[in-house]
Image (cartoon, helix red, strand yellow):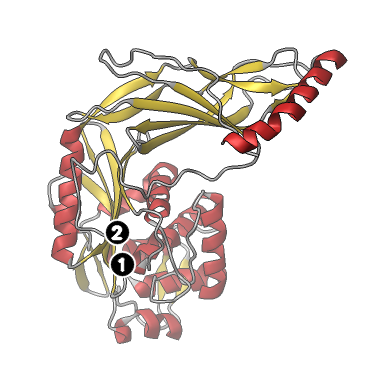
Amino acid sequence: MLSSSVMTVTDIERLGRSLTVPLRILALGAAIALASISAPNAQDALFDTKAKQALMVEDQTGTILYAKSPDTLIEPAALAKLMTMEVVFHALKTGEITPSTQYTVSENAWRTGGAPSGGSTMFAKLKSSVSVGDLIQGVIVQSANDGCIILAEGIAGSEQKFAEMMNARAKEIGLKSSTFTNSTGLPDPKQRVSLTDLVTLARHIKHEYPEYYRTYAQDNFTWNNIFQRNRNPLLRLDIGADGMGTGYTEQSGYGIVGAAERNGRRYFVALSGLASDKERAEEAKRIFEWAYQAFEEADVFAEGEIVGEASVFGGIKSAVALKAHEKISILIPVANRDRLKAHVVYQGPLVAPLKADQPVGTLRIWIGDALVQETPVYTAEAIESGDLKKRSLDAVFELTTGWVRRLNF
């Protein structure tokens, strides 16, 4: 059952200006999915893009700066190689392989992804041996399909088994809706991704594998005596870009996942559905330049500050204070400072006993109608079980009010 009740409503002066944060607690009697961010957001009046799908996130605070149908499933094309590289980087980190590990170029890799294919390739010679380190450069810098297949066959034995590894890792790192069927992103009706997942994946790679992430900024790579430049157009636009990749299919149009940093602040963007490679580069540059100018950081809650309360069933107290582990900050529009709204969402009522620092829900922050940030919240104290009388009273209260919550949500 779902219920909604205002347990605490507090007008809090934040950020030294007239922003207020009414704190609303939503008690959930069943698990609830994350709110969709595909609806028009508060920043639409300040920026729009020709891309059919778009998502921009500031990395440090996790603030969603712009969202346009980011959960629509699309063909990933070469952007699937980001997931391929995650599997490879994970194998390197766990010691299953090393950069010097050698893999042989099979006929399948050569015909499907090499020189005879007519697609993106590092021109690896049939039956030659190539190191994992060189294959990584070929895949990242040259978007090499042969490099992907060589890695997939070498690590998993076949591309099909490697795709199973891709999907398993995708779930482990928090991708919600994407499905991978091959290592290259070559067309397959079952292979689909969302921009939300692609940005999650890009941020994960940057934080989890910083030593390998640097390859995404590499300008060029020569293999088999053939010099090729990095296909990411953002690297040559003087906007602080240092990754990630591009893709194109007839159905999804031109897409890109990009990362850039300026003045110590990092941004990730994903765009899809653009009409040309020129338009892709222009729109990506434009959204980065807009983000650099249009937002400023604001602290919403200090480290350790109580952000709300949650109802407790059968405890010595009827409510428990909630807090986040770290300071909560967001980026807010400089020119359009809408009212901030913070809602704590949890599955409840919580049942005693509760431990201190127990994860119980999420703090969701909106600017206007746009959900811009979600942060886990934890119990600020332990709550012991109450005596039999207290538990009985709570049980009667739950029985007599639960139906009201079901009707009024």
Disc 2 vs disc 1: Cβ atoms closer than 8 Å?
yes
Secondary structure beneath label 1: loop
Q: In which quarter of the image is residue 44?
A: top left
What residue would you read off at disc 2? Answer: 245
Task: Give the mark toward the camera: 2 or 1.
Answer: 2
Q: In which quarter of the image is the C terminus?
A: top right
Q: Quadrant of residue 314?
A: top right
Measured in 3D between alpha carbons, the distance from the residue under mark 2 to the one under mark 1, in whole angstroms, is 8 Å
Residue 405 image position (x, y, % from top left): 63, 32
Q: Which residue is drawn at 45% across and 68% down?
A: 151
Q: Which residue is drawn at 50% across and 23% down?
A: 324
- How many numbered marks appear? 2
In the picture, the disc for residue 409 is: none
Query: Furthest-right residue in view?
Result: 388
What residue would you read off at disc 1? Answer: 143
In this view, 33 is above or below 110: above
Secondary structure beneath label 2: strand
Q: Is residue 345 visible?
A: yes
Along the line of sight, which residue is nearer the eye, 99 or 159? 159
Residue 15 image position (x, y, % from top left): 29, 16
Q: Which amino acid does label 1 sit on?
A: Ser
**First-in-chain label (2 vs 1):** 1
Q: In which quarter of the image is the N terminus?
A: top right
Q: Can residue 387 be seen in this view?
A: no
Residue 125 image position (x, y, % from top left): 35, 81
Residue 36 image position (x, y, % from top left): 43, 47
Q: What residue type is labelled 2?
A: Gly
Along the line of sight, which residue is nearer the eye, 63 or 403? 403
In this view, 312 is above or below 175: above
